[in-house]
Structures are given as structure tokens and as C-alpha cells.
Amino acid sequence: MKYCTAPWRQTYVQKALKMKKCVFCEALKKKNDEEALILYRGKHNFVIINRFPYTTGHLMVAPYRHLGNFEKAPREIVIEAMEMVQLVLRILKKCYKPHGFNVGMNLGHSAGAGVADHFHLHIVPRWTGDANFMPIIGETKVFCEDLKTTYNRLKPFFAREEQKQEK
């Protein structure tokens, strides 16, 4: 069996355990979606870029409500969240053409959740060979674009979706 390590995440996880404020609730308080990295707003959930991505295009879907227990979440929130995951997959396929995806949740600190009290779904585009020696040997993660570029690249796709919803 082979093991994959992500040592660059340790700093974030340790910092997240000490956070007093929820990063999702704080992002929602911002008046500027671009500054908050919010790409799309639904009725119950929103799509946001991960500030500490595994790969370029690493997005998350989270509910507006501060909910820690996915299994107790209202049905309408869960259904819309899953529909948003489908939307994100379609947009990332068009925009980045990844070879595959990791989609999932980390529920609880021991399961790797940096923010355990506000559940969220990760959608991580993957390419064959996207993991290399840099994070392990050089303790450096290399991305092909910065978060602002990712936001500007994806926002038009989500804006078209918003326009469809308004009609």
C-alpha cells in the first residue's frame, strides 16, 4: 500500500483548531463576493474557493446556516448542496478539463475538518501526475494560478448560471 502525505496542511489544521470565528460565516458577512471568494449563491448554500487548496480550482459548497451535523441538516439544504456539487463539476470540467475529481466531506476535527462546526463539501479537480515531490521534499505547494485568477476565470461560468436562475 502507498501512502500520500500532505505536510503543508499541518500549519492550516493547527491554526484552524484555534480559530474563534467560522471562515464560512465570516465570508458571508463580507459585502464583496470577490474578496470573500464566493462564486455562487443559491437559496440555501453557496460556492466558495478554498483559500488553502489542494489543487487549482478546489471549491467548496457550504450552507448559509452554521450547521455542524450534516445528518441533521434540513432536506432542502442537502438537496441543493448536492445540486451545487453537480453544477461545480460541470463548470470545472468546462473550465479546467481535469482528469478526475475528489468530492467529499471531512466531518469532525479527527476526520480532518479544519472547520468542524460548519459542514461543507470539497470538490477538488485532479490531473494525472498533479502530485509531485515539491510538497514532500521542498515543503512547498506549487499552483498554476493564484486565487484571484481562479475567481476571475470561474466567475463568468457561475454568473451565467445565476442568469439562468433569474429567468
Image (cartoon, grey):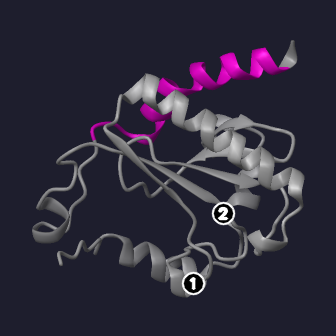
Residue receiving disc 2: 23
Nearer the observer, 144 or 1: 1
| As drawn, 37 above or below 62 | above
Q: Which of the two residues, 7 or 125, is positioned nearer the viewer here?
A: 125
Element type at mark 2:
helix
Label annotation for residue 109: 1
Query: What is the quadrant of the N terminus in the image?
Result: bottom left
> Residue at left 62%, top 46%?
48
Q: Amino acid at mark 2?
A: Val
Does 142 sit left or right of 125 as displayed?
Answer: left
- Residue 128 part of the magenta segment: no
Residue 119 picture location, percent across and down = 69, 67
Instruction: Assess whether mark 1 and mark 2 are in contact (beta carbons under 8 angstroms).
Output: no
Q: Quadrant of residue 138?
A: bottom left
**Is residue 154 in the magenta section?**
yes
**Above or below: residue 55 compared with residue 144:** below
Residue lying farthest to the top in this orientation: 167
> Where residue 120 appears, x then y in whole percent?
65, 61
Percent from the top left, x then y, of residue 45?
Answer: 78, 47
Dot in front, 2 or 1: 1
Residue 155 shows which numbered tag?
none
Image quadrant in which the C terminus is located: top right
Residue at point 47%, 77% (across, down): 13
Q: What's the magenta region?
A: 144-165
Q: Secondary structure at mark 1?
A: helix
Residue 88 versus residue 75: which sits nearer the camera?
75
Disc 1 residue type? Answer: His
Residue 141 pos. (x, y %): 25, 57
Residue 3 found in image quarter = bottom left
